[in-house]
Each structure stands twice: as structure tokens, then as C-alpha cells.
Amino acid sequence: MSTPGRLWLVPAPLDFGCDSTTPLQDVLPQGTLVAAAQLRHWVCENAKSARAYLKRIDALVPLALPLQQLDIQELPHAVHKKGDHRGEFDARTLLAPALAGHDMGLLSEAGMPAIADPGSSLVRAAHDLGVAVVPLVGPISLLLALAASGLNGQNFAFVGYLPQDASERQTRLRQLENTALSSGQTQIFIETPYRNPAIWQAMMTHLKAQTRVCMASGLTLSNAAVECHAVQTWRQKNRTPPKDVPTVFAIGV
Amino acid sequence: MSTPGRLWLVPAPLDFGCDSTTPLQDVLPQGTLVAAAQLRHWVCENAKSARAYLKRIDALVPLALPLQQLDIQELPHAVHKKGDHRGEFDARTLLAPALAGHDMGLLSEAGMPAIADPGSSLVRAAHDLGVAVVPLVGPISLLLALAASGLNGQNFAFVGYLPQDASERQTRLRQLENTALSSGQTQIFIETPYRNPAIWQAMMTHLKAQTRVCMASGLTLSNAAVECHAVQTWRQKNRTPPKDVPTVFAIGV
């Protein structure tokens, strides 16, 4: 039996679905581009956008094989479901190239695979099957937002999406605020962009005046903006996050 | 009054204090190197290591000014203290160049400033003083470890360091395990490298057989290794993390 290949976690830029296109070399190290360009076997969320990304890489570092000859598999849809990182699927089939000795790449639609994105189930299976996992450096919007917030970066949590129901969302926001105020643990969350204004309104209405809130929009894009203020300061500014730009929110002290 | 300059958060490689030296272009995008090379005013933890890092950048992208002519200030020691991201200090003096219209860089010893590292107090002051904050892409060991762990990346917390006292550490480990098992929230923590074997022994002794544990050592270095298994599997492997390599630990389901 041959030594298994490795599973490389390949980050993507954060401009997916946005108007602006970030030059890849602004957000991805040369080392990441070179490693990605060598890979002949891929698992991704969506083969079409994976090919578009690999084409952008090819313009900077020639791919080892022509795009059409790459082996590109999609993660099963069950594994995409938000919040379920242990969806059942046939990992042995997806990881067959690695088990046969070939290096493979895992790619998500934006940022780092397996962080606030599908992919962890495949990584989990790789560990179980003895396939070494190698993460490559690239943009991770949650952590860029946290660093730029000035909120506590020694103790923090990312909690995903908040409930859509207004009453449940209010309860959840107050719960996150209580955790942040009582433990000092910064609470980070995201929202589907078109709901950004609604979640912001809820924060301005229900959070305490002194609680600090960070709004980080369009990170690494040309319209990037990060601001962090006490709720009472935000209320005076009377601002709203854009409804068409990915935004990361955080609550802290 | 002039428009304030911006505060750029400049990540550093993770090889600080380690034998191996990672080529900068493996872990830092060209965009980060170019942005850093333009900056003439810096705030850092330690001026000596900041100069050593800037010298490495200069070899790839020439600095705007000779190294000796750069303005390099150190964060006051009170602000270094782990767990206190709101130390009192004279932010107006540190941020004086930005308030006078010049862009500035903030640098920590390894990885991203203000994440598991000092710097958030300066970022916080920047927001209060109307100085825009721009995070640059680079390596963040906590998140590279999380992505490569296969543990839940939709809901996770970084909780810093565990208590040193054996009894308190045991209590804290069980508390983190309970949180991970009951809420599905991955719990990430770090340790001073020479204590890695002790914390590992405590995990092997006190955690449940089915709980999954990730050990991510030397990320982005030549001796990088990430593995994640159930405690019962780790016990069979009878392994111990290196006591001289930065290691990230995580507990999850």
C-alpha cells in the first residue's frame, strides 16, 4: 500500500459574488499559490467557481495540468448544510486520490475551508484515514475583523448565524451580550448580507449603551471598512451596514 | 487639522524564536509585504525583533526609508499583559503620527497583532480617535489549527491559556469538554511550549474516551504536524507534543 497523499486546505479570496476583484497576490502568499498550482485532485463546494479561481491562479503560477484535466469533485450537498460539520457521506470515495498516494486540495467558496464554511467533515475523515492535513495561509474574514475591532482577542467565540425570527434574535443578542460582558469573551457572528440592516437595527435597539459593537464590511475588498464603537456612539452616527457586502459583527467590552 | 493616517495591522511569520525560518513569501501575500514596506511609523512589542522582521521584508520589497530612519515605538509593558486588552496607556502619544496624517503599522511578535497577542488596546484607541484600521492578511496559528482539525468551524471559541495549577487545570479542562460536548462549540487553547507535555498528559488523563482532541504543532514551519483523534485513539498512539514548538490544542466533537 502506498503512503497516502496529503490534503491541502487552500484558502480563496473573499471577493466571491462581489463586484470588486481583489488581486490574488494581495491576499494569498506566493507559497499558497505555488502549492495550489501543483495539485491535480480537488474537492470543492462548487466546481464552476473552483475552476474560475484556479484560472486566476494559473495566470500567476502555471497549473501543473491544464484546467480541463484536473480532477474536481464537489462535496455532497448534505455536507454543505450550515451547522452540521459531521454530515454522512462517502469520504473514502472523495479521498480516493489521497488514499492512492496523490496530494489533494480542499477549497471553499471564500476564505478558509472548514471555517464558517463546509469542509470540516472531509478534514475529519482525512484524520480518520491517516491522510495528513496541511493548512495554507490566506484571508479569514472573521479573524481579520476581530484583529481590527480592538475587542478582546485573548478570549473570543464565533457563533455563526443568529436566529431569523425577531424575538428569538433579540433573546440571542442579549445572551451574547451577557456572555461578553460577564466573561470578557468577544462574541463574533455573521449574517446573510441582505439581512445586515435588520440585524444591525436589532443590535442598536436591544444592546446596552456601553457595549462595544464592531461592524467589519467588505474585508480585503476595495470598499473595506471596520469600525468599533459603544452602542451609544453608533446611535449618534446613525449608520447601517451595506446590504450587499459580506459583513462580520462582534460584541465585546 | 489633517485627515488622520491609517493604522495597518501587519502580521508576522510564526517562526519567531524557532530554529526554522519560513520564507516570508510562503506565509505573507505580496500585498502585505508591499503595504508594510511603505510604512515609516511603527508600534511593536519589541523594537529589536521588529527591525529583524523589517530587514527580512526589505530583502523582498525595499523599505520606503532605511531601517535606521524608521520611527519604531514599543507598546508599554502594561499593555502586554496577557488577558488585559484594556491596559491604560497614552494612546495619543503612540498614535501621534497617525493623528498627524501618517500611516502607521502595528506588529506583534508572531502572527496577527491583537489576536492571542498584545495590540487590541491600541486598535481600540485608534477607533476612539477616528484613525481607520486596516488588517492585512497573514498567518494566524489558531485558525490554521482549527481548519486543519476537522472539528466544528461553524461554532468555536479561543480561551487563551489554561491554569497552571494541576487541580485547577483539570477543572478547567472538564469545563471546556462539557461546553464542547453540550453545545458543539470547539474549544481552542494554547500553552507555553515547555508546558505542552504536562497539558497533554492532563488531557489524556481527564478527558472522555470519545472526545476529539487536536494537536497542531509548528504550523507553517518545516516540522508542522496537525492530528485530531478521539482521546481513546490518542491513548493507543502514546504520543506527546514537542516541548519546544508552539502548539495549538482544541477539544471538540
Image: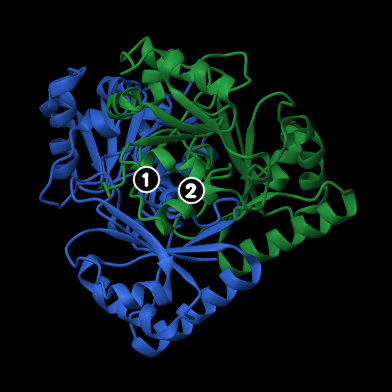
Chain colours: A blue, B green
Left or right of B11, for residue A240: left
Query: Quick check: B95 left or right of A56?
Result: right
Q: Using a 10 Å C-alpha cutoff, classify the residue at mark 1 as few (fewer than 14 neighbours), some (14 to 19) or many (20 or more).
A: many
Say which mark, if any, is on residue B99. 1
Give the tally of numbered discs: 2
Q: Residue at x 24, y 53 (%)?
A: A218
Q: Nearer the viewer, residue A197 or A133?
A: A197
Residue type at mark 1: give it: Leu
Does residue A91 appear left or right of residue A195 in this picture? right
Q: Residue at x 37, y 41 (%)?
A: B98
Residue indicated by mark 2 = B92
> Does residue B44 lie above or below B85 as drawn?
above
Query: Residue drawn 26% across and 71% down?
Result: A196
* Chain to which mark 1 belongs: B
Based on the displayed image, in which of its 4 quarters is residue A107 positioned? top left
- Circle 2 packing at 10 Å, graded few (<14), some (14-19), many (20+), is some
Q: Which quadrant of the rendered structure holds the C terminus of chain B? A: bottom right
